[in-house]
Image (cartoon, helix red, strand yellow):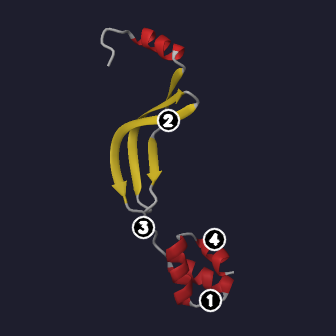
């Protein structure tokens, strides 16, 4: 972008413009999307950039996608049924919806 400018000069220019950046060390970045699917970035290079009071992140690495499917065990269904006195069908439906044992119990209580 700015050919011929050494990194120290670039940092100085950015500091004068009110831009700071910091590298963040991480093994993995997981982004949970609204549809429930996951974007997983392995071996990421992460830069935290602060400019005019706003913070943004620049992330690069090995990207993979995963659907977030939660298996509902018979034990979980039984636990929900026992704690809420509901039917097996209702317990299973609520677990599928919430994807969380405690949340399903709270919803049915």
Q: Is residue 55 left or right of residue 3?
A: right
Mark closest to the chain's N terminus, 2 or 4: 2
| Quarter containing the C terminus | bottom right
Residue 79 picture location, percent across and down: 61, 80
| Quarter containing the N terminus | top left
Q: Which residue is mark 1?
A: 86
Q: What element does badge 1 sit on?
A: loop
Frontmost residue, 81 versus 32: 32
Tag shown at residue 102: 4
Image quarter of residue 60: top left
Contact flag, marks 2 and 4 (Cβ < 8 Å): no
For the question of whether residue 75 can be seen, the reply is no
For the question of whether residue 67 can be seen, the reply is yes
Mark closest to the chain's N terminus, 3 or 1: 3
Few, some or many residues within 10 Å of mark 4 (<14, 14–19, 20+): few
Q: Which residue is mark 2?
A: 56
Contact flag, marks 1 and 4 (Cβ < 8 Å): no
Q: What element does badge 3 sit on?
A: loop
């Amino acid at each position: 972008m700015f050919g011929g400018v050494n990194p120290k000069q670039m940092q100085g220019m950015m500091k004068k413009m009110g831009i700071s950046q910091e590298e963040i060390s991480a093994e993995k970045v997981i982004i949970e999307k609204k549809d429930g699917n996951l974007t997983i970035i392995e071996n990421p290079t992460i830069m935290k950039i602060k400019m005019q009071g706003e913070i943004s992140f620049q992330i690069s690495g090995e990207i993979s996608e995963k659907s977030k499917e939660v298996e509902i065990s018979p034990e979980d269904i039984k636990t929900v049924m026992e704690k809420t006195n509901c039917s097996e069908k209702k317990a299973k439906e609520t677990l599928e919806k919430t994807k969380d044992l405690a949340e399903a119990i709270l919803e049915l209580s």
